[in-house]
Image (cartoon, helix red, strand yellow):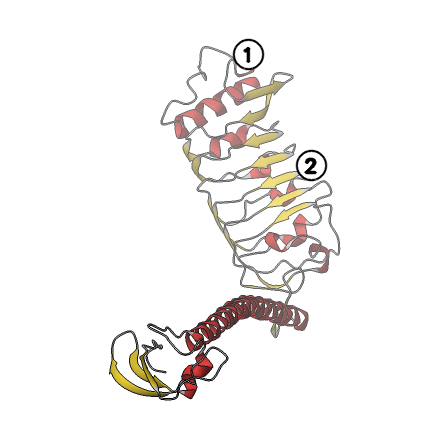
Amino acid sequence: MVARDFSALLDFKSDSDQFNSLSSWSDSTHPCSGSWLGVSCSHGCVTHLFLDRLNLSGSARALARLSRLRLLSLNHNRLSSAVNVFDWPNLKHLYFSNNRFAGEFPTGVSSLCRIRCLVLSHNNFSGEIPMNKLTQLPYLLTLRLEANSFTGTLMSNSSSSSISDFNVSSNIFAGEIPFWLSRFPPSSFAGNAMLCRKPLGYSCSNGPTKASERKNRLSDALVLVIIIIDAAAGVGIILTVEWCCCIRRKSRTGARTETNGSDNRKTREREEEMVMFEGCKGFSKVDDLLKASAELLGKGSVGSTYKVVVDGDGGGGGGGGGGGREESQRMVEKKGH
């Protein structure tokens, strides 16, 4: 048995290790000696292979001869030739993600009665998957088939399964999603345009369900209401600020107008009372001047000059001689009055 495993590993190295990533695999040492990269053994037989991210390419068919294998991980390499898993009856974990495996679903998977994790994502597999047989595997917990080209439906005769981690996104599946699979999130089925029913929310005959349509309409209406409220609030703020500024300007203008009017009235009153006399004889106040006769002598930039003739009565409380006295008088008035 040990010799068979030894030759199988060396053949795999010869077929796939172009960059000598498995340099520790030497024909001078034993695979179970602990010096071989990624190899674990039990009772002298190879049971675990961890060969992720080693830039391996080519075929992996030689590994089918490892009959005691329980775990095989070849993630993130460039391997392109798949293997027949019939020869791994004890296999529990199979990880083939991110390689270049192509062709139909690996033959013999449905016979792996102890399989728990099956990860074939991000490859070039195509064709239908044996859904009925997969749901009958009693210990299968993880089924990851995303990013391939699988076709067909997901229907099976089983109404339940032990599967708790499921993903078939980015394939070409079509038809209804079985009820027992509807407990998985929409992301588990995304990228399959022809799949329908829960959890995707699409009716198999009429496209999006009424509930989905109502939800979309409500969402659009809510967005529109929010936009209208925001716009109204913005206009209200602008109008309020403009109104306050207008009231403030009117208040200031009114105050200035009232002040200017008061000043103008006081100035006119002072100007109306402003009379200057020069060489006044025979009278002492403006009323006496207004009773006299006056002759305009001339006008200037400051005011007008008058000659006033006053009829005196001798003044001084006694009689007085008659005859009129002529006195010169200059009265300065505000120009324009």
Helix or strand or loop: what does disc 1 sit on?
A: helix
> First in sequence: mark 2 or mark 1?
1
User: Label 2, label 1: how many angstroms apart (C-alpha)?
Assistant: 27 Å
Mark 1, residue position? 33
Identify which residue, 163 or 152, lies in the foreground: 163
Amino acid type of the residue tagged 2 in the rendering = Arg
Determine the residue positioned at 49% across, 25% down. Answer: 8
Residue 205 occupies quadrant: bottom right
Above or below residue 96? Residue 176 is below
Q: Residues within 10 Å of mark 2 (few under 14, many from 20)?
A: some
Identify which residue, 150 or 294, lies in the foreground: 294
In the image, 227: left or right of 313? right
Determine the residue positioned at 53% across, 39% down. Answer: 84
Question: At which x and y percent is residue 334?
Answer: 35, 77
Above or below residue 249? Residue 272 is below
Q: Are marks 2 and 1 in contact (CB under 8 Å)?
A: no
Q: Quadrant of the N terminus?
A: top right
Amino acid type of the residue tagged 1 in the rendering = Ser
Question: At which x and y percent is residue 123?
Answer: 48, 45
Q: Residues within 10 Å of mark 1 (few under 14, many from 20)?
A: few
Helix or strand or loop: what does disc 2 sit on?
A: loop
In the image, 319: left or right of 32? left
Question: At which x and y percent is residue 320?
Answer: 43, 84
In the image, 167: left or right of 37? right
Mark 2, residue position? 114
